[in-house]
Amino acid sequence: MDAADRCEQIISLLTLSSCLPVSPSLLQPTPVILLKEGTDTSQGIPQLISNINACQVIAEAVRTTLGPRGMDKLMVDSRGKATISNDGATILKLLDVVHPAAKTLVDIARSQDAEVGDGTTSVTLLAAEFLKQLKSYVEEGLHPQTIIRAFRTATNLAVSKIKEIAVSVKKDDKQEQRELLEKCAATALNSKLIAGQKEFFSKMVVDAVMSLEELMSLKMIGIKKVQGGALEESQLVSGVAFKKTFSYAGFEMQPKRYENPKIALLNVELELKAEKDNAEVRVKSVEACGGSIQTSVGAMTDDVLGQCELFEEVQVGGERYNFFKGCPKAKTCTIILRGGAEQFTEETERSLHDAIMIVRRAIKNDSVVAGGGAIEMELSKYLRDYSRTIPGKQQLLIGAYAKALEIIPRQLCDNAGFDATNILNKLRAKHAQGGMWYGVDINNEDIADNFVACVWEPSIVRINALTAASEAACLILSVDETIKNPRSTMDGPPGGAGRGRGRGRPHAH
Amino acid sequence: MALHVPKAPGFAQMLKDGAKHFSGLEEAVFRNIRACKELSQTTRTAYGPNGMNKMVINHLEKLFVTNDAATILRELEVQHPAAKMIVMASHMQEQEVGDGTNFVLVFAGALLELAEELLRMGLSVSEVIEGYEKACKKTLEILSDCVCSSAKNLHNINEAKSLIRTAVMSKQYGNEDFLANLIAEACVSIFPESGNFNVDNVRVCKILGCGVTASSMLHGMVFKKEAEGDVTSVKEAKIAVFSCPFDCMVTETKGTVLINNAQELMDFSKGEEDLMEANVKAIKEAGATVVVTGGKVADMALHYANKYKLMVVRLNSKWDLRRLCKTVGAVALPKMMAPTPDEMGHCDSVYLTEVGDTQVVVFKHDKEDGVISTVVIRGSTDNLMDDIERAVDDGVNTFKVLVRDKRLVPGGGATEIELAKQITSYGESCPGLDQYSIKKFAEAFEALPRALAENSGVKGSELISKLYSAHHEGNKNMGFDIESDGPAVKDMLEASILDPYLVKYWGIKLATNAAITVLRVDQIIMAKPAGGPKPPQGKKDFDEDD
């Protein structure tokens, strides 16, 4: 009896349990599940508008850093490290943007950084301004593809206009070329923290780049930071400098200065091996002096030994530095930066990096345009005139492009606290009268011929900024749907490997 | 108590806990159709030159901005079993011809949508299927009549360019002329007289910076690597390729060396150094000027390579190594030894250069008879470059398809409308109930020009009526004029907007097959998804990371 009773109970339990999960689906039709649970989709014009708004927010973050009167940003990352910068690419990199559309702006800033090294803020601003001008057209229901076509046309026109009006400087004349380079470097440094010392640094940067060989590898310029001292105490060493003291027993007795030494570059431990005939310094990374790096102590012949005029150990700030100076085959140089706070020297390093990149571009590509919003105003005028000659929607759109270009001088004025409307009016009038190079004069709250005022930029910087900004704007415009899959929670090795590989992005420094 | 006799359990009880079960027309067939319809609606807006991009963020949080249907679907992780079938059909299309994936989706979606109408009218599933099958067979017969031209000489860059242009246009509208030119040059230069074309021989290298129009094409290969040693440029290079690390040989077995005194210790490392030097010297003396290795480069070996002025390049991917071997005509040596002249490859110039701020090593042939060509893509964002890469892939695939079958049909919806017209009249000649489904099959073709029109902001119905009237006058090649503002039609042959015959052939075939398979299902049984860790996704190719 007892057993049968329990049996019945079990059966009823069984049927119940196997019935329950199915029954709801039998009663009411479940919705069709097409995608994985948790997938997020959004579509249509509202989605496009929201993407545009997101980009605007990003641009807002860097807007105030543009130009000589731009302000710096202080950012504290998740590890509590503080960074002060007004370099658009650096700021955006540290912001850690996750919004997929806004990420595009971060990407173009990175691209500008990679291609020309400077102008990262302008490229972001331009892209955001393009989108802002277009927002109303998108809301009115203009097809994004029409807009994209108009923008591509406008960009092509603008780029060919830049090429047409850019002034090229003859390479043969060394003196003239040098002047050009220094002016370009000065313009780049103008908007940075170290604007006050721009003459000093632009000279240094040009010297540094000039000492490089054909390929102009950036790695061959070392930048060392030593805290303390004034900015002007920074120096350029044509050769190598590094922080290291003599490193073997009894080095106190050795002289700290050698003239015309022969140098053995070793990257093996110098422990058991016997002493050689000159100062032995353990060198971690040196690629100068014309000596090749030696792995073996065996074949120590003359041709593998490097030479330099002077080797000395010097006190720099609180550190002892080794200098190799006046190397005959020197294709490398080192900049030793001095300065107060750590953040300050770091920002100086970034600024110098930008300036170095600009100088390198200017050497490869010797045409320049006037900065300070002059070229943008000229392009704006050119495109506006052009747009009046064509019929249809394109006219409006190219007009919008022309208007968007004015953001650069406008922001320059805003950041300097000038009346932007007033200055822009003056600029427009001047450009209409043929004053091609008139731009914002930051010092006198007026307009000035920036070509005469030596505010020069390599034309490639502007060309790249325009192309990148309009490509980004077109990319964002062409998206009408976002589908976000839930992040997979795979934590096994395949997931980890996949994540690393999936990104597959070249990590630009 | 009397013994309890349990009732015969229903179907649901026979299954494991949590299993789902749907059957019948209403529950299974219509649900499936709805799922497929929804999917095709997502990709429909991406069809054609004016199609919009989709932003897809996959489960690894990688962002894709694309209008390539195959990519969207791959990253979407479609879960619905019936919708998956259509996805599979589109994958087949990708593998078979490499282009026209969206065509499959839109067409299959349209077929199913119309099938639903038929079923609601009261036709049985089998009648619909029979009609679709008949119509499909007839379509493929008619399709060969639609052929309006054929490629004459694929070795001619200009001709290849005009053929590739249509495929590129649907991905990168606005840049099509520029990109088609690059792709055509790349394809033609590696297209041998024997007519054996390998898609893999057109390589793509993406480098951030500048704009799309700065992209270029060269004969040979480009690697995002730096030269290891001091030598950064070699002309008329003789290349020795090693699949092993550029290092001294390590023995398989472990050996113990007993060193008694300091002299022996010094001699030991000296012996190693001498051996290495002899090795490198032998390679140099064999005539090699460039060493390419698949493994690590030892400091010691590099030192001697610098000494003997050898350029050393390190490639991590074994595929890259193989391709390089093919490009330069070298044989990869498994062991560090001096190569024979036959084993060495030749390249006109090997040099390190900087593109943007990326260091690249270029293996370049001056002549146009290389085995591998590379398209260097520039762009301002990674997503943009990825999308251009897909456009290049499509273009190259189109070239491949044309190598197999030179026939071309007009694009821009012209072929579809012609087929629709002919199938409708064929349907009317059929006596049975399948007449309805054949006519619906014809109607399904209208979905493609309609999508083209709607994506361009033109009224679909207006365009389709215009197209029909043009085709009834006998203008078989009239298609949608995408450049115009309204629903205008244009002769596609004159505008040279042509699709390869095979793309359409397989597209129609695969879409019909997928639609029929979905219709055939009358019961869905889904087991409860098992818990536990997911199986690793082994699909990833080694090659993907280059």
Image (cartoon, coloured by chain):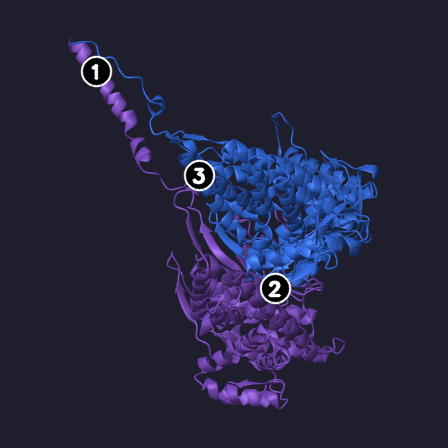
Chain colours: A purple, B blue
Q: Residues within 10 Å of mark 2 (few under 14, many from 20)?
A: many
User: Foreground residue, A295 or B249?
Assistant: B249
- Taking the spot 69% from the left edge, 71% from the top edge, the residue there is A365
Helix, strand or loop under label 1: helix
Q: Is residue A217 visible?
A: no
Q: Is residue A273 visible?
A: yes
Whether residue A371 sits left or right of residue A161 in the image: it is left
Separation of residues labelled 3 and 1 (CA atoms)? 40 Å
The residue tagged 1 is: A8
* Residue type at the position of mark 1: Glu
Q: Find residue B96 and name its label.
A: none
Q: Find residue B30 and name its label.
A: 3
The residue tagged 2 is: A115
Vertical relation: B539 (above or below) A132: above
Q: Residues within 10 Å of mark 1 (few under 14, many from 20)?
A: some
Tell me the mark number nearer the camera, choosing from 2 and 3: 3
